[in-house]
Amino acid sequence: MTTAGTVGFVMLCHAALDRAAEVARHWAQQGCPVVIHVDAKVGRAAVDRMRHHLADLPDVRFSPRHRCEWGGWGLVGATLDAATLMLDEFPGVRHVYLASGSCLPLRPAAELAAYLDARPNTDFIESVTTEDVGWTIGGLSMERFTLRFPFSWRSQRKLFDLWVRVQRVLRLKRRIPEGLVPHLGSQWWCLSRQTLSAILKDPDRPIYDRYFRQVWIPDESYFQTLVRLHSARVESRSLTLSKFDFQGKPHIFYDDHLQLLRRSDCFVARKAWHRADRLYAEFLRPVDPAEARAEPNPGKIDRLFSKAVERRTRGRPGLYMQSRFPNENWENGRTGGPYSIFQGFGDVFVEFEAWLARTVGLRVHGHLFAPDRAHFAGGERIYNGCLSDSAALRDYDPKAFLTSLMWNTRGERQCFLFGPRDNQALNWFIAGDANAQISVISGAWAIPLFRAKGEFSDLRREAARLQKIESDQLHVLRSPWTKARTRIWTLAEFLENPVEPLQSIIDEISPTALRRLTEVPRMADLTGFGRFLQELRNQGMQPTLVGDVPLGEDPKPAIGRRGRPYLVK
Amino acid sequence: MGIIQSYGLRLARKRWRFRAFRKRRELVPVIDRTARIRSGDILVFSTLRNERIRLPWFLRYYRDMGVDHFLVVDNDSADGSREYLAEQPDVSLWHTQASYRRARFGVDWLNWLQMRHGHGHWCLVVDPDEFLVYPFCDSRPIRALTDWLDASAIRSFGAMLLDMYPKGPLEAQPYREGQDPFEIASWFDSGNYMIRRNPRFGNLWIQGGPRARAFFPDNPERAPALNKIPLVKWHRHYAYVSSTHMLLPRGLNLVYDEWGGEKASGCLLHAKFLDTFAAKAEEEMLRRQHYAGSHEYRAYHAALRDGTDLWCKWSEKYINWRQLEILGLMSKGNWA
């Protein structure tokens, strides 16, 4: 078995030095040389304490301190000095591993050494050409290498952006030194002695250093680019487990990630919360070689963090809550799931809800937006998620009512009745919702009027009002912005042949059923309906949305037509 | 937002801060241990009146969470709250007999204390019946959250008020001192909340829950606001505008995402509906020291007289934060 002493660790530290010291001790006690760089911004007392803590370890060195601004040259300068020190002082080192002070070793150093020895002359460094990188911050990839960046991105953002724009407009460009092909990648690498010393001792290094001082975020490109000049074999991946969120900031590991980290196949994780006592206690324990390792399963970690990014950027469709309140058209799904709206069906058929519920086995509500209250299925006063049937509460925020209902019942398709007597506030919202399936029998509102007793002039006025409302609604449903699945029949068309429309709606609601309708709902008694319509016309009201019901003739309910080929009894 | 509006908000903020500065005279220190606050400590600010029975659990809950110091204004309690708090080693206490209403329901007092002692700290402003739940609160202390917020350059953290209630009449299960109130009030409404944007301050205005459903079904606009931003990395120039519902500068109110994503958020479990509530409602109705002429308390009083049970068969029983996150009441955002 190889000894761990062939791997040297370079640690870049800037905070939580006591934790960094623990990690350094852990490595040093396994025989690995460690070179520590502490950011020049850290106070002297903290550094002295760290030196004091590590004074008993012969193979720990401190490299000259640089000031490390994010995105600046300091980190690369510090790495170069520390790496030089490492190679000069420890001739036994065959590989140098670059880590940060908040990195957590996941596997024993001897395993790492064995792993590297099994792959001689290989450099583990993520190194990708700028064209292939999708993750750069600020939209700069190739321009990192061709523009100049005298201003800090963190503290002088406006100047930074302005200067980038000025250079773009004036087409100012730097020349990339000859022979260099810009590559980017994670800043945490593990290089072989040959490659690293070739980079450090390259006669052209002053040229490269001068050039990279003005490149933006050189710690993600200096070694990644130069390694391509000197390495015999680049394995373009990092041995450090490091997950980034949507802003390019590393995810942090906590105590509750312990089991996940155990199953990682990486050697080092970045970065651990400095107070994650259990993680540190667990992974910095003295190594017991007999201990069985958990089966690596890095996919689990990937999933966890990619889901976090997805949640932050896309969110859960149909959810409106305290920390997700999307602007219109940014909902990524206006409602939580598909639902069906039936308009006019409750007028044409008797007990349509009960029939539909039986046929498709779903929750069918009455008129949810009725003026008196929300008629939930089964006459419930409070529904899923404690939604109240109060009309005042519903009309106070109808959109919240609908989206809450769909969110609360996600996974179970909801059906409800609608009509021109109901609250129309959501017409545009529903029309723009791809989850909505809307089936309209236009003019069906005339049936309850026909059955109502009362002054005919009042009925006429009511008919005109309902027709106006419904025609406005149909206008919305027929607009080019409509995303809902809509079907519209006039009452006359529908009565002509009611079974086929019903069949097609039901096929769409439950496509797996593939059933033929064996039972059709009972139709309302329409004797004298044609006469009633003619009476409306006679009074000067054109019921255009009802369609073409011939004078005096009562519409023949097609249900009576037995023996149609598609009606299987 | 135009320059004029922006300047108007700036003036408003200065006015609230000046008001807080004036109201400082109303606060008489009972015991001031603020010298013990170290840099980076997490602080809780609270105003209370006659909450003695709740205090042991309240202090324990937040101590376990990792809060370092409590700064409390006692609005003339007569039940021993003051004496109890004065004995606690991590509490600084002020006393006042002044009007709660004229201190804008305590906001002025706390704005002053935060200006004085909260600068540069993560400050949590909660009532003694509000209990913060945040993602991973069962496995990570609150400092993990504030460190992550710091690293993400987020200055404020939203936590919606979630009204908790027992099953059956309130008096049926008396609350014992030191007991977890959610052993009794363990139910909540999971999906009946109404949200709109407040154009002036940029915050969300959330209403709903059991109080809207049971007490305000006929005039929902009067239902109490549930949006809260209780946890803020305080700067002495900040000011709460109305309770912890919103702050200035208005950027602090943007605890929600407008482009489809979810930001991290928590919930404030509200243990208001215990057997102590009836007495409280009676007292507050008579004192008329609450918002909008205590109309809220009048509505409660009327409903409670009729024996209203907030529980219904769709009520959810509280389990943990993961349940709240699945139900969509809070979110982990990109904290994993």
Image (cartoon, coloured by chain):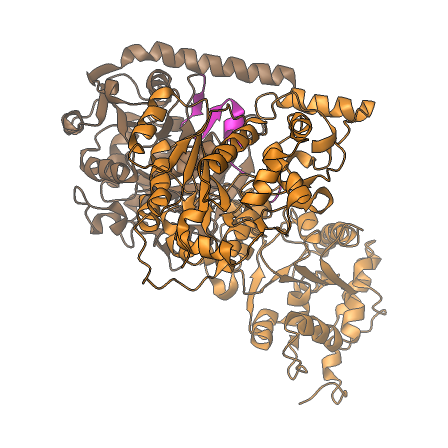
Chain colours: A orange, B brown
Instruction: State left or right for residue A59 relative to residue B218.
Output: left
Check residue B240 for magenta coloring: yes
Is A105 located above or below residue A509 in the figure?
above
Quadrant showing the N terminus of chain A: bottom left
Give the residues drawn in magenta, as a range. Answer: B237-260
Quadrant housing the C terminus of chain A: bottom right
Q: Nearer the viewer, residue B193 or A16?
A: A16
The residue closer to the viewer here, A147 or B210, is: A147
**Vertical placement of residue B2 versus B294, above or below:** above
In front of the other: A276 or B84: A276
Residue A479: give x, y in percent of width and height.
79, 51
Residue displayed at 50% across by 54% down: A116
Q: Residue at x 80, y 74 (%)?
A: A496
Q: Residue at x 35, y 64 (%)?
A: A292
Q: Judge from the rendering whether residue B35 lies leftward or rightward of residue B329; answer left or right.
A: left
| Residue B20 pos. (x, y %) | 38, 14
The picture quadrant where one finds residue A120 is bottom right
